[in-house]
Image (spheres, rainbow, N blue to C red):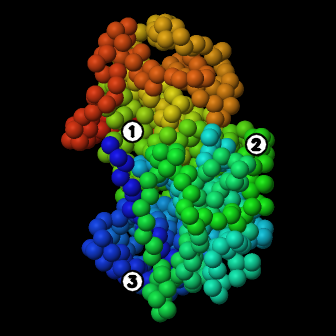
Amino acid sequence: MEKLPLRVLACGDVEGRLETLFGRVRAIQSKSGRFDMLLCVGDFFSSTSDAEWAEYRSGAKKAPIPTFMLGANNQETVHYFPHDTGCELAENITYLGRRGLFSGTSGLQIAYLSGTESQDEPTPAYSFSSKDVTELKSSLLSTLNFKGVDILLTSPWPRDVESFANSPGEIDTKKCGSTLISDLAASLKPRYHFAALEKAYYERLPYRNHTVLQETPQHVTRFIALAEVGNTSKKKYLYAFSIIPMSLMDPAELVKQPQDVTENPYRKLRKGTQKTKVLGCAEQEETACQFFFDLKKHQGKKRSSDGKDRGSTQTKQAKKPSQPTGPCWFCLASPEVEKHLVVSIGTHCYLALAKGGLLPDHVLILPIGHYQSVVDLSSEVMEEVTKYKSALKEFFRSKGKRYVLFERNYKSQHLQLQVIPVPLDYSSEDIKECFITQAQEQQIELLEIPEHSDITQVVHPGTPYFYVELDTGEKLFHRIRGSFPLQFGRAVLASGALLALPQRSDWRSCTASRPEEEAQASAFRRDFQPFDFA
């Protein structure tokens, strides 16, 4: 089946003119059909935005389309953005955060950097520094087989973007814009890059991201700068386009070069980009933050950042999935996330019933922030994961059960700790023997981690692996070097040696109706409440 493209609108400086913007969006949708999202760059608010914004903030009015914005570019509007990690400010209106990458359920990858460039220390709340750009680049370039992102959102223009291309008119890109943004664009190779702030519309000719005859052909980048909403000069401030996520495209189709393609305007910077790709993890300090929604209905409520205080330099390398082959179903920013399955929300993690669970009380421990695996977690997130493990152990023991936990860091984007109860009659040795036996049958080397050792001591970030943990703390580990059966952990537990539910080894054959799922989640919340520290 052919993948339908996403229909996206991009907008320049809104400056608080919400009625003008959304009125125009409604008119476009009435004429051309529904769009999937609206991306806003530049100044979303102004110093006189309070009156119109209050109606949306209170819920009296609602944006007609999921709207995503960048943060403040000046001190006067900082107060509109309560948390630099991003949040939902009003229904259908979301602040992305200071920097990061948004992966929606469609697979579309949108990198973003809020604010304007600053050399000041400390960096103002409405600005970004060279460190911010370095950390954002490092978090993405460390991804295995990184090819680029679908969209890049920044407020400032990149410096020298007009090189080798059509003129932007009155705008002198050798004086305006940001060199750091140029560096970021050269590194991330977005298919579309949107910016604003200069009160001008400029659609640059597409430029190539490879050196002809020296490098394998890559996709092109289209840079579009947009004017301010409702400007009297009738300059274009809204841009409509369709896009199929890069991860879903045929490689040959992706790298097709249009006839008007130009040389890369950041040629000199690209040499530095290639060096960045091979930097060791010792030079990577911190990864970008992935924004998320608070599942509770309090608009704009903060949930803690996922990327600010990781303990070691080594854990910074693989925040993004090492194999981003599909949508991130567990990133809470996704408007399609099945929130009715969530049964507990902590500060850094949440608990949710598994979709198509092996059993009705099959649950997942997931970080609220966008982490790929256990070895990437910061100390505070890991501490809360441990609390959930302890709570679940007590909960299941009260029901005459014990849990088996497993994680597959392979062909996944967001950390999922699968927690499945089994009868207490099964000893640790019984469970371990079952896993090891079935692993051997499939030529999988499953090794027991020495007592008191931790998973982070045996594997580096970005390494594919599978591991099992019992509620006693005993662990089995397999380093994935080739292919790996995606349902292995579940299939072992469903086998005749344990739960004897082979027909439920694949979650897709176990999905329930929405009312059934809601009833199961309600029952679990009620029973788990005495044990829920959150």
Q: What residue is pinned by disc 2?
A: 278
Q: Residues within 10 Å of mark 2 (few under 14, many from 20)?
A: few
* Label placed on residue 352: 1
Name the one closer to the observer, 475 or 17.
17
Relative to 50, is 299 above or below?
above
Amino acid on which the number 2 mark rests in the picture: Val
Cα separation, mark 3 vs mark 2, equals 47 Å
Amino acid on which the number 1 mark rests in the picture: Ala
Looking at the image, the residue that sits furthest to the bottom is: 232
* Label placed on residue 20: 3
Cα separation, mark 3 vs mark 1, equals 40 Å
Nearer mark to the viewer, of 3 and 2: 2
User: The residue tagged with tag 2: helix, strand or loop?
Assistant: loop
Specify which label sits upstream in the sequence, 3 or 1. 3
Q: Is residue 406 visible?
A: yes
Horizontal and vertical percent for residue 150?
Answer: 53, 56
